[in-house]
Amino acid sequence: MTVSQWKQNRFYPYYPGLEVDVLDVVGIAVSGQTKLKNVRNTYKDE
């Protein structure tokens, strides 16, 4: 699942009207095409 898919399917239905950024381990917002498993992996390495 990508970040964009997660936002559409899991975040926006429960928090309408709000925006969210998904951050990697260094605090940088990742793009919508980034796969969530890749974001999680940045945290595992720390």
Image: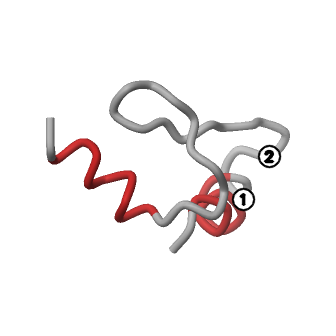
Q: Which residue is mark 1?
A: 13
Circle 1 Cα neighbour tier, 10 Å, few/some/many (<14 / 14–19 / ≥20): few
- Say left or right for 45 vs 36: left
- Label 2 sits on a secondary structure element that is loop
Q: Residue 11 location in percent, x, y?
A: 63, 53
- Label 1 sits on a secondary structure element that is loop
Q: Which residue is mark 2?
A: 16
Query: Which residue of the protein is positioned furthest toward the top in this rendering?
Result: 27
In this orientation, which residue lies closer to the viewer: 10 or 39? Answer: 39
User: Image quadrant of residue 15?
Assistant: top right
In this orientation, which residue lies closer to the viewer: 37 or 10? Answer: 37
In this orientation, which residue lies closer to the viewer: 8 or 21? Answer: 21
Residue contact between numbered discs 2 and 1, judged by CB atoms under 8 Å: yes
In this orientation, which residue lies closer to the viewer: 46 or 5? Answer: 46
Work out whether 35 lies above or below 22: below
- Say left or right for 3 vs 24: right
Q: Residue at x 35, y 65 (%)?
A: 37
- Say left or right for 29 vs 38: right
Total number of numbered labels?
2
Q: CA distance from mark 2 to mark 1?
A: 6 Å
